[in-house]
């Protein structure tokens, strides 16, 4: 089995070799820029690690893995526009470095390019891989729409939020694992177990993101702390705070949710975080993360390969669960 670090290096080397120096430069340069920012490369790494559970030859899954990574980064370009985010991975977002039109059009080309790479999947697996990828792509759009819809709703249930992040984040992790397993020659049962492992890790991953946005270190997190609070994003933390708040906490939360004065940004972040602390929603979020993490490991336990082959995936799941960035 290849290690996580070796797999990341393989993917990064392959991505760095893609030539984006094409005309018109204004279309392709932003793509090279965003892919050069790195990131965790979680999706392509999961693809290759799942393949490696069943085959020593991971090279056959590299193009598919790259396609998934390019697609993921495409979604970030459009997501950053919708969220009006200034920073991604510690650098200016594409729409800030260039403009909205550039980020939209460069993102569109990235989506097309992702399909071109996935089309290089070995022929015997191409149809199921394309079918799953297309389904996943549509689900991600559904999740993003729910996310947008929630911004205009006063109340969102925790169950609705979890379904939204399953669609927006977790399904691509599941897709990466199932795709890699198929290409490696896995049977359908093992491929589905790995898909379920990915779904549960993805849910824990996004809940961790919610936590880090409030309680993380801006230097390691790579984007501004408190961004979700400033745009009143219905995170797992805020949803539970709104459910639990009583008396003065209700008044304070509602007042800050109605306040969009940019000059009071720091005060808003501090005040809302203090309400979160008083209501204990950080612990509620951490407990739910642990729930999904445990479910993920239970699915991995059932995959019918030697235990030592699963250790790298176990370590990766733990790394995602306890990360600080």
Image (spheres, rainbow, N blue to C red):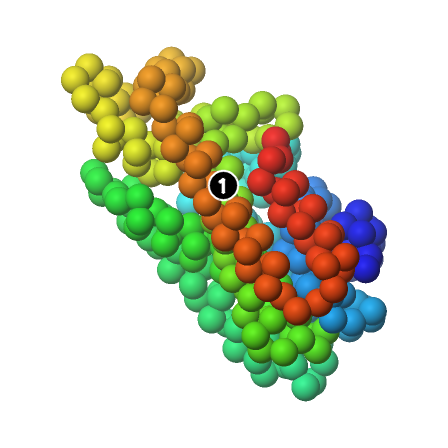
Q: Position of residue 46 (x, y in %)?
A: 67, 58
* Residue 154 as seen in the image, left or right of residue 117: left
Name the residue nearer the viewer: 6 or 315.
315
Q: State the residue position of label 1.
A: 290
The reply, left or right, for residue 18 in relation to residue 282 is right
Identified at 55% across, 60% down, the residue is 299
Q: Percent position (x, y) of residue 73?
A: 60, 52
Residue that appears at 76% across and 50% down: 4
The residue carrying pointer 1 sits among few (fewer than 14), some (14 to 19) or many (20 or more) residues within 10 Å by Cα, namely some
Residue 314 point in image, percent of width and height:
67, 50
Give whichever of 69, 287 is nearer the camera. Answer: 287
Which residue does the image show at 63% across and 66% down from the upper left?
303
Locate residue 10, reporting x and y percent. Answer: 82, 56
Identify the image quadrant of the N terminus: bottom right
Q: Quadrant of the C terminus?
A: top right
**Extreme residue in the bottom direction:** 124
Q: Is residue 192 above or below residue 15?
A: below
Q: Is residue 26 visible?
A: no
205 w.r.t. 110: above or below: above
């Amino acid at each position: 089995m290849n290690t996580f670090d070796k797999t990341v290096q393989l993917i990064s080397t392959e991505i760095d070799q893609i030539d984006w120096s094409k005309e018109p430069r204004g279309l392709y340069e932003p793509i090279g820029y965003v892919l050069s920012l790195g990131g965790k490369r979680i999706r392509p790494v999961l693809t290759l690690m799942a393949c490696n559970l069943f085959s020593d030859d991971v090279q056959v899954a590299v193009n598919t893995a790259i396609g998934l990574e390019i697609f993921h980064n495409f979604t970030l370009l459009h997501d950053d526009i919708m969220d009006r985010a200034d920073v991604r991975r510690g650098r200016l977002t594409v729409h800030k470095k260039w403009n909205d039109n550039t980020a939209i059009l460069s993102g569109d080309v990235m989506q097309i390019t992702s399909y071109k790479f996935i089309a290089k999947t070995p022929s015997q697996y191409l149809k199921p891989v394309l079918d799953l990828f297309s389904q996943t792509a549509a689900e991600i759009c559904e999740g993003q729409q729910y996310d947008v819809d929630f911004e205009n709703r006063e109340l969102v249930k925790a169950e609705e939020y979890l379904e939204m992040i399953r669609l927006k984040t977790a399904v691509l992790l599941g897709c990466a694992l199932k795709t890699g397993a198929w290409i490696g020659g896995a049977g359908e049962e093992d491929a589905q177990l790995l898909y379920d492992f990915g779904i549960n890790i993805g849910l824990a991953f996004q809940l961790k993101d919610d936590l880090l946005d409030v309680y993380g270190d801006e230097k390691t997190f790579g984007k501004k702390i408190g961004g979700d609070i400033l745009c009143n994003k219905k995170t797992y933390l805020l949803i539970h705070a709104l459910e639990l708040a009583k008396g003065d906490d209700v008044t304070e939360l509602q007042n800050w949710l109605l306040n969009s004065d940019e000059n009071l940004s720091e005060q808003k972040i501090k005040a809302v975080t203090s309400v979160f602390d008083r209501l204990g929603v950080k612990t509620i979020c951490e407990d739910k993360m642990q729930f999904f993490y445990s479910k993920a490991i239970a699915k991995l336990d059932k995959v019918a390969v030697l235990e030592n082959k699963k250790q790298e995936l176990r370590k990766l799941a733990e790394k995602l669960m306890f990360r600080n960035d």
